[in-house]
Image (cartoon, coloured by chain):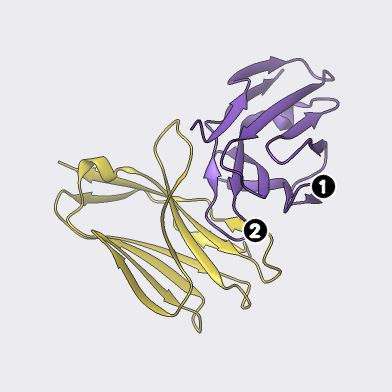
Amino acid sequence: NAGVTQTPKFQVLKTGQSMTLQCAQDMNHNSMYWYRQDPGMGLRLIYYSASEGTTDKGEVPNGYNVSRLNKREFSLRLESAAPSQTSVYFCASSDSPGETQYFGPGTRLLVL
Amino acid sequence: QKEVEQNSGPLSVPEGAIASLNCTYSDRGSQSFFWYRQYSGKSPELIMFIYSNGDKEDGRFTAQLNKASQYVSLLIRDSQPSDSATYLCAVLNTGGFKTIFGAGTRLFVKA
């Protein structure tokens, strides 16, 4: 049981480049989430998927898009990276919205 | 006003003491409350959740909830150096879909 996995672990981008962060869970959870964590800001919700086939905006969705590919996978795409998107990105999953969330190891992204 | 507020710390306590971590929230309709622990460079992991007013105990940890005062706390008894971490308070909003996290309180337990 891997739990929640994220790829890549580290990434350096130049301003304007695009990339997709991948997330997968093997716990048969219905809900999945993308957060970013910046110093002093805690975790901020970017997008979430309450169940397969649905996605909704969180607190800070601008500059991001998501795809719930299937029940297991939830990807986050940066179409045109900006330095303000330098952060640590965490994917999480839960059995249903509001239940305990289980987090992946995170992706550290640096945008130059 | 932030939706979930925590004192950023650092909070420093000696080994064996009680550490008290506090959190206030602004959404009066919130129903579920969580405490996560995050070690430096790692991902958050759940310590406890609480839904009802009062105290909930799990080993050395006690969560306290006062909905009238919109206040949640976490007590750590017999604090150990291994408890040194950032503690994140999280609140499920009224709609029941979004969990809002506080910025976290850094705790140092001195041996």
Q: Is residue A4 above or below residue A18?
A: below
Q: Is residue A33 above or below residue B1?
A: above
Residue sitting nearer the eye, B84 or A107: A107
Chain letter of the residue beneath label 2 in the structure image: A
Placement of the N terminus of chain B among the 4 image quadrants: bottom right
Q: CA distance from mark 1 to mark 2?
A: 14 Å
Q: Secondary structure at mark 2?
A: loop
Placement of the C terminus of chain B among the 4 image quadrants: top left
* Percent of width and height locating residue A78: 80, 29
In the rendered structure, find residue B111 and report the number of the disc placed on it: none
* Residue density around tag 2, few if under 14, some if 14–19, many if 20 or more, within 10 Å: many
Q: Secondary structure at mark 1?
A: loop
Residue sitting nearer the eye, A40 or A11: A11
Q: Colour of chain A?
A: purple
Q: Is residue A5 above or below residue A50?
A: above
Residue sitting nearer the eye, B63 or A53: A53
In the rendered structure, find residue A53 and report the number of the disc placed on it: 1
Residue at the disc numbered 2: A97
Q: Colour of chain B?
A: yellow
User: Viewer-nearest of labels 1 and 2?
Assistant: 1
What's under tag 1, amino acid-wise? Gly
